[in-house]
Amino acid sequence: MNSTSHYPIKGTLSLYSAIGLFALVLVMLMFAAGLNGAPQQASDAPATRVETDTLHIQEGFVTSVYVYGLVESPNASDLSFDSAGQVTAIFNEEGDWVEKGAVMATLDAERLRARQVELEASLARANADLALANMTLSRVKSLVDKKLISSQQLDEANASQASAQAQVEEINATLASLAVDSDKTRLLAPFSGTVSARYVDEGGVLAAGAPLFTLTSKQAYQIRLAVPADMLSIFALGEMVSVEFENGQLNGKVLQHLPIRNRQTRTIDVLVSVNADDGLRPGDMAKVRGEKRHAETGAWLPVGALSNGLRGLWRVFVVNPQTQTLEGRAVEVLYTNGERAFVRGAIRDQQQFVISGTHKLSPGQTVRVSSSSPITTGAGQ
C-alpha cells in the first residue's frame, strides 16, 4: 500500500527535474549564441557616415548688442517774432527747403513807419533847437569876453546847448531802435533747413514769441539711445557703430554720453551722430549695433552639433582618430544666436566634432568621416 503510493510522486519529481535541466541548457545555449553572434553583428554593421569640422578654442568671444533710439535733428528750432503783430505775408510752406538768411514771413509794420515819421520830425526840431543853442552860445561868449554880460549868462547858454545836443542824440537812438524793430518784422531763416511745420496763416495775429514755423536742419542727424549703465562701455566715445533703419543702413559715431541718468528708466542717454540720408528723418526709429566682449574660453559650434546631455548640460560628439568611434563630451552653452553657439567644457583644440544629426548617434559608435564645411569663429550676430 505504501510502496505503491510513492510511484506518482517520484514520477512527478523526475518530470520537474527534466524540465528544469532542459531550461538551463536552453539558457546556456542562447547566452553562448549571443556572445558568439554579437561581435559578428558589430563587425557586419556598416560605419555611419558623419560630417565633421575642427574645433578652434579661442580666448573670449564677441557678441552683438542692439539698442533702439529715435532720430533727432541737432538743429530744430521753432521760429517766431519777438514782438506781437499781424502776419502780412508767409513765403514758405511745409516741406520747403530754406536757405540761411531767407525771409520766411513778415509782420505788419504800419505803426513802425508812422512812428518813424514822427521821430524824424522831432529830430528836425531838435536839430533846429541845437543850431539855435550853438549860435546863442557863440554870441554870449563874445559878450562875456567884452565884459558886457556876466559869466552866469554864459553858463546858462552852455547848459541850453548841451540840452539841445542831448535831445538830438536821444531821438537818433530812438530811431536806431525803431530800425531794429522794423528789421524784426521780417522773419529770417537762422540756418539752412526744411520747414517741418507751419502754425499760422496770413492775417493771423501773433503774440510775442508764438511759433510760426519749425525749421529742421538736414546737414547731420543724431540718434538718442537710452543705454543701461552696465552697457555704457560698449558705446565708447568716438567709436564707430552700425546704424540700421527702415530704409537702409549707415555708419555712425558715438558723440556724447549725457551726464544725467534718467530717473524713470535709470538709463543714460547716448548721442550717435550720422550723416543725413534721404531715407532717414527725425522721429524715425533706428537700431544701433555695438559689440560686447566676453572673456570666457571656448569654441563656436553650429547648434546642430549639440544634443541633450545630463544635468542640464549639452553634449557634443568628437571622433576618436585611432578607433574612428564617437565620444560624447559634456559642454555648457554660454551664448547662442539661433544658428551658432559658443560653448565650453571637455573639448580640446583641433578635435574633430560632428556638426549635425547628433540625435541619431551614440557614444562608441563607429563612424566614417566625410568632407566638412568650415565653421566661422567671428562675433556672434
Image: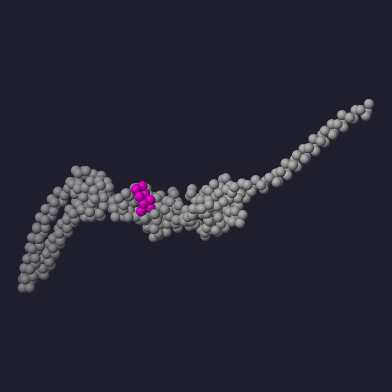
Q: Is residue 13 magenta?
A: no
Give the extent of the magenta segment.
243-250
Q: Residue at x 17, y 53 (%)?
A: 182
Residue 58's x, y, as percent? 52, 59
Q: Which residue is rendered at x = 35% and y = 56% of the image?
A: 273
Q: Position of residue 307 (x, y in %)?
A: 56, 47
Image-based side of 120 in relation to 340, left or right: left
* Residue 124 as seen in the image, left or right of residue 59: left
* Residue 228 appears in the picture as rendered: no
Q: Residue furthest bottom?
A: 146
Judging depth in this view, the residue of 351 and 150 nearest the camera is 351
Q: Is residue 130 above or below residue 302?
A: below
Residue drawn at point x = 42 percent, y = 53 percent = 289
Q: What's the colour scheme?
A: one colour
Q: Quadrant of the N terminus?
A: top right
Residue 321 position within the rendered picture, expressed as x and y whole percent measured from the top left? 59, 56
Based on the picture, tell me whether residue 245 belongs to the magenta stretch: yes
**Camera-nearest residue between 350 and 289:** 350
Q: Does the magenta stretch mainly form a helix, a strand or a loop?
A: strand
Q: Position of residue 179 (x, y in %)?
A: 17, 56
**Does residue 106 appear anywhere in the picture?**
yes
Total marks shown come to 0
- Residue at 47% over, 56% down: 378
Residue 352 sits above or below residue 131 on the image: above
Q: Quadrant of residue 233?
A: bottom left
